[in-house]
Image (cartoon, grey):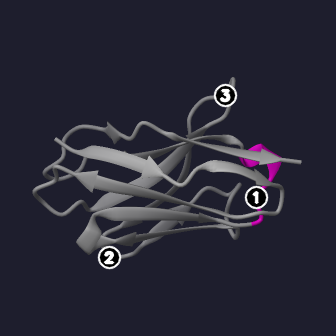
Amino acid sequence: QVQLVESGGGLVQAGGTLRLSCTASGSGFSIYLMGWYRQAPGKQREFVAHITSSGSTNYANSIKGRFTISRDNAKNTVYLQMNSLKPEDTAVYYCNVPPQPYYPLDYWGQGTQVTVSS
């Protein structure tokens, strides 16, 4: 069983920055893929970015060039550096460990609120 705990959300003005963190616990084996999703009010949850244990990344087009995902494998922690934030980035951001070897379930954190004011 994997537990994911996010931190780092908050209120920021447009153009500002935030850094989200997510730490995984209860994982006896290395986690290959970790990622971030977000859900804005009244909208479906959407993919933001993911990163493999070797550092390969993938980003949603809407945040490409503004957000950077990274991870510290020794700490089982994934980060999301968010720059040039826009009001449309306002959402609850969720950390995710999708089904993969040794982890057959879809694991989610509790979410952290990011609010960008105009």
Residue 30: image quadrant is: bottom left
Image quadrant holding the N terminus, namely top left
Q: Which residue is mark 2?
A: 54
Residue 88: image quadrant is: top right
Which circle, 1 or 3, is nearer the viewer? Answer: 1
Q: Earlier in the sequence, mark 1 or mark 3?
A: 3
Question: Picture coordinates of residue 107 (x, y %)?
Answer: 31, 40
Q: Secondary structure at mark 1?
A: loop
Residue 34 falls within the magenta-colored stretch? no
Instruction: Identify which amino acid the numbered label 1 is placed on.
Output: Leu
Q: Secondary structure at mark 3?
A: loop
Looking at the rendered structure, which numbered label has been put on residue 43?
Answer: 3
The CA distance from mark 1 to mark 3 is: 19 Å
Q: Which residue is mark 1?
A: 85
Q: Secondary structure at mark 2?
A: loop
Q: Residues within 10 Å of mark 1 (few under 14, many from 20)?
A: many
